[in-house]
């Protein structure tokens, strides 16, 4: 247990601590004596100001100790420690937590962990044994599916017109509908992306709050496919701040296609002459016949 009172002999050995500190750091780096702190029984630490410009607020710490019943003080260590006003480097953060959107540049690689919650296993067909790849590139037709008689020799069976698709055909169709990838977006990853896009181009943004209408009624909105089509679309207005970006259908801006329809120039009505009743002829020059 640390003693509250510094050992008298160790505390009085300021000159010894100063000499050791100047020997380790150099006389030009050591300043005035700042105090003594008890580290334990017969163990104290002397603090000296650090005069190095790059270490403002740091302190030199030299620890002294002595054996029981001994009057000779010995040196433990000399180190440089930060003080209350010291400038410290920020706490180290792993790169996976330090990376932010937009940090990647050309040539950068971002590895994805095997247990990333944003992804889940997809279908590539490599482990599917229902459609084996035969040497000739065709499917097995031993069951009579090539149009010939079946194994019982009965021609014209109901399976005569059925053709088993080749693995190449299955792979092409799978790629067209978005399959064939080792991993696909999980439900968690989909919701996380939707929340992120909603925060950037959603109904709660200042731009959407001041917009005359929402993107769902804008002619510049490009529809997308999939489950996200019910909540998002792509903006195609070059004057919009969201041009080319995925926007929420509840987002909006001043570039809405129906926001400011230019009024047509008003056309004055045609002159109307009343010729249904007789009118008295009035001469402009009554003195002339």
Image: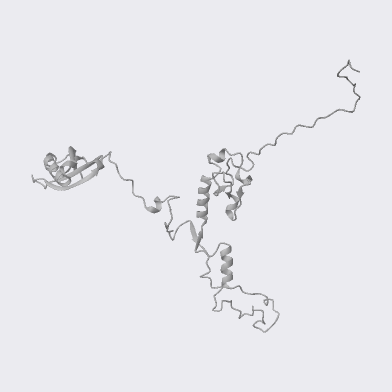
Residue extending farthest to the bottom is: 153
Q: Residue at x 59, y 66 (%)?
A: 173
Q: Is residue 276 left or right of residue 111?
A: right
Which quadrant: the N terminus?
top left
Q: Quadrant of the C terminus?
A: top right
Judge left or right: residue 129 versus residue 29.
right
The x, y position of residue 162, in whole percent, is 66, 74
Q: Residue furthest front?
A: 288
- Residue sitting at x 22%, y 45%: 80
The quarter of the displayed image where residue 30 is located: top left
Q: Is residue 128 above or below residue 177?
A: below
Question: Quarter-wise, where is residue 49 in the image?
Answer: top left
The residue closer to the viewer here, 213 or 185, is: 213
Q: Position of residue 3 (x, y in %)?
A: 18, 42
> Quarter-wise, where is residue 4 in the image?
top left
Judging depth in this view, the residue of 67 and 82 nearest the camera is: 82
């Amino acid at each position: 247990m640390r003693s509250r009172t510094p050992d008298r002999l160790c505390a009085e050995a300021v000159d010894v601590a100063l000499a050791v500190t100047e020997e380790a750091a150099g006389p030009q780096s050591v300043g005035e004596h700042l105090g003594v702190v008890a580290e334990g029984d017969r163990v104290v630490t002397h603090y000296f100001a650090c005069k190095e410009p790059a270490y403002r607020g740091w302190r030199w710490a030299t620890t002294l100790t002595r054996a029981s019943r001994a009057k000779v003080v010995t040196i433990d260590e000399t180190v440089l420690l930060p003080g209350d006003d010291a400038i410290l480097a920020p706490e180290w953060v792993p790169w996976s937590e330090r990376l932010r959107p937009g940090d990647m540049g050309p040539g950068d690689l971002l590895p994805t962990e095997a247990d990333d919650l944003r992804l889940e296993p997809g279908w590539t067909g490599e482990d599917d044994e229902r459609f084996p790849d035969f040497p000739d590139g065709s499917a097995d037709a031993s069951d009579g599916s090539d149009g010939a008689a079946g194994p019982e020799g009965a021609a014209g069976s109901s399976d005569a017109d059925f053709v088993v698709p080749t693995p190449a055909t299955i792979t092409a169709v799978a790629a067209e509908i978005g399959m064939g990838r080792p991993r696909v977006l999980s439900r968690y990853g989909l919701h996380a992306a939707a929340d992120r896009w909603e925060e950037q181009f959603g109904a709660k943004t200042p731009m959407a709050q001041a917009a005359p209408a929402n993107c769902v009624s804008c002619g510049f909105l490009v529809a997308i496919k999939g489950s996200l089509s019910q909540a998002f679309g792509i903006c195609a207005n070059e004057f919009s701040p969201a041009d080319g970006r995925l926007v929420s259908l509840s987002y909006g801006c001043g570039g809405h296609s129906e926001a400011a329809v230019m009024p047509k120039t008003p056309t004055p009505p045609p002159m109307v002459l009343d010729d249904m009743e007789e009118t008295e002829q009035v001469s402009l020059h009554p003195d002339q016949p």
